[in-house]
Image (cartoon, helix red, strand yellow):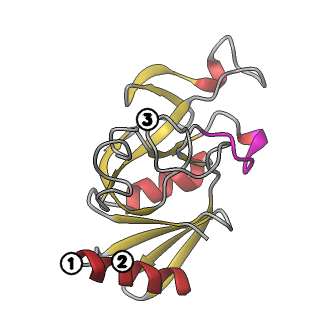
Amino acid sequence: MKEFEVYLKCLKRHGLKRTDDVLIAVLGEQILQRWQADQLVESLPFSRSKKLLSCEQDSLGTPWGLHEVAAKHGDGQPAGMVMVGREPIGERWQDRPDAGPDQPCLVTTRILRLRGLEPGLNAGPGVDSFERYIYIHGTNKPERFPENISAGCLLMLDEPLTKLYERIAVGTHVFIFKT
């Protein structure tokens, strides 16, 4: 509950209104909470960057603070679809010749692209989450989940990500809570 209260204080500080749905990513617990009104309706596991938390450009760290879903990519694609430049490439990671433990980390299944809403923290020069291509997306490393292996993004398993993607609208707030 304290994370939701911190989210509300952040809104007040920035003069913003709540969105119908709110996602709160609790970094210390690696749980993504989905709130409707004042009710916690869902808690989903995620993983994050293998680097230290950071909002800095080129840090490869997961940023924190208030964001919104700026765009959604992957409508109707099968689980495991590889995305390059936010577009499906027509093959699932499982079907690629390089599939296996040595396959590089890929963006898969669905993408919720995030835009920072806090100037100087996660929006603007040198710290811009949108320009850093920070997403919530699927992983081609389910056997390593929830190990922190991303280059700054929040990673989820295919089934919960696909269900979340269908429930969340562009503009939904995503508050990444640094504990």
Residue 160: image location, x then y, percent: 57, 56
Q: CA distance from mark 1 to mark 3?
A: 37 Å
76 within the magenta span: no
Secondary structure of the residue carrying tag 2 is helix
Kind of residue sitting beneath label 1: Gly
Quadrant housing residue 45: bottom right
Secondary structure of the residue carrying tag 3 is loop
Instruction: Using the image, determine if residue 68 lies above or below residue 79.
Output: below
Give the residue drawn at x 63%, y 29%. Answer: 105
User: Start and end of the magenta stretch?
Assistant: 143-150
Q: Quadrant of the C terminus?
A: bottom right
Quadrant housing residue 15: bottom left
Q: CA distance from mark 2 to mark 3?
A: 35 Å
Give the residue number, with chain letter if any, for mark 2: 10
Give the residue number, with chain letter if any, for mark 3: 77
User: Nearer the N terminus, badge 1 or badge 3?
Assistant: 1
User: Nearer the N terminus, badge 1 or badge 2?
Assistant: 2
Kind of residue sitting beneath label 3: Gln
